[in-house]
Amino acid sequence: MRGLHLAAWLALGLLLRALRVGLRWDELSLAYAAYQEPTARALQEGRLLDAATTWVGLHPPLYSLLFGLSELLLPVPLLWLAGSALLSLLAVALVGRAGGPVAAAVLATSPVQLADAAEINNYPLATASLALVLLTARGPWLALALAAGLASWSHVLGMAGAGAVVGWRLLQPAPWGERLRLASASGLLAAPVLVGAFRRMAQPDTFQQAGLEPLAWLELMAQAIGPVGLLLGPLLLLGLRGPALACLAGPGLALGAALLLGAAAPHQRPYLDLLGPAAALGIAAGLDRVPGRGRQLLSAAVLLLCLGRGLTSLGGELQVARELRADQLRERALDLALAESAPGDTLWMVVPALQPDDDKSATGPLMWRLPPWTPMPIARPVAFEYTDYRYGQPREHRGRVIHSSTELDEQAFDHVAASALQRGRLFVVLADHGPATGLLQRVERALRPYRVEEEEVGEDRGLGVDRLYRVRGLAEESADGG
């Protein structure tokens, strides 16, 4: 019966994460993917040591290495999104095996976990790694050491959580030889990451995040956890013991120090993902400490609360999916650009960021004109630094070069246009620009030096009418020819 209950929560977790995969395919997906480009380039050029030591901000290299390999072998965006979702689901499975159906239910429906489940970053990997640390905490020393090494290479807070669990294990009664082997193996695996972390701390830009406002941070946590999470708080306090306590306290203290020192951004909610596995096990353990029939009643109540929030999330996601589907049925400027263009042409999409991406609720209906299951390798139409976002993270899509940016930088566009017009045709698509004050004027100012055919496409549904610009060449060339 326990196995059936676990399977049911895994099925719900899979459904919720599959929806996240679809909803997170937007313009920002390519922006997040661009963070990993230095590692992908190092792998492509055979600089393996550089690839293994390249950090993305304060994040260790493991995720970038995995992502870089996918860029080389099969650069399909769906794999990036679905890979993260499967890692998030793996965390649910590992926690369920360690703590039972209640722990699985808590993690499967956690709003924090769902928001980041399909992100192109290392948080799902780090969360699954910490879940593995908790599952192996009382098992063979080698399994725990390997899990701790994996967590350390996934995230700095993962290293803090794994180190705390290893520390707890070293304090338990066991032969000195076993404890020495555990400490040595764990330390050896984590050493390169620890060295990299100290190097990052020595850089002047590491401690430049905004100052911490405790009340604002607590409000952010409450919103991220949600009402069900707050209701489960007493059970967490009741059951937080042993490895779960260590795995919560280690990252929690490290995060608090990073926030106070300005190394972590106070508005970044994904840090809380790494506390999820320990919290889920703590809540399940808290139920086990409730005596008598009260445990069964309380367990049923917890499962119903988790089911309710899971179904609520499912309803909201399905509504957004229907809206995305409806958008595919109307004509947009990008549809015309794709239909008119051919291999060798260049398309530049300008779509403003109309809301912060902190809660991961933004969607990009335009990007679904570029199916994420088609290969989209990195494109380098001109010599530039790929992480320079003025160039719109260009990708190849069915022979075309696609740029996507929130603005149209004049210098970057001129640089690209000079090359693009020699290879083929150049299209600029401006979409969802209505609420972005002055964006239309800025785009047209950037296009002023060119001969352009402009067309309005579609109808205004509150975000402005799409504009399609067919760039034919420099305006001065036309004047000279006349």
Image (cartoon, rainbow, N blue to C red):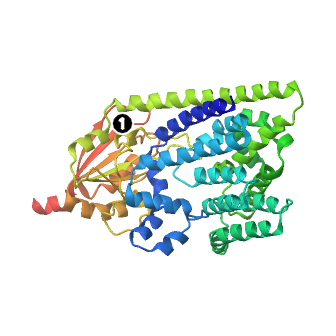
Q: Going by the image, does 285 lie left or right of 8?
A: right
> Where is residue 204 shown, x and y percent of the image?
64, 73
> Where is residue 454 shown, x and y percent of the image?
25, 44
Judge whether residue 267 can be spotted in this image. Answer: no
Quarter of the figure that contains the N terminus: top right
Quarter of the figure that contains the C terminus: bottom left
Position above or below: 115 against 479: above
- The amino acid pointed to by label 1 is Val
Question: In the current view of this chain or complex, which residue is farthest to the left?
Answer: 482
Position above or below: 137 against 49: above
Kindly indicate the quadrant of the structure image that contains residue 69.
bottom left
> Where is residue 408 shown, x and y percent of the image?
38, 55
> Where is residue 243 shown, x and y percent of the image?
79, 52
Position above or below: 444 against 58: above
**Mark 1 residue element:** loop
| Residue topped by disc 1 | 465
Neighbour tally class for label 1: few under 14, some 14-19, many 20 plus, Cα within 10 Å: many
Residue at image point 79% right, 54% down: 246
Residue at image point 74% right, 47% down: 278
Question: In the current view of this chain or complex, which residue is farthest to the right?
Answer: 291
Please tell me which residue lies in front, 271 or 351.
271
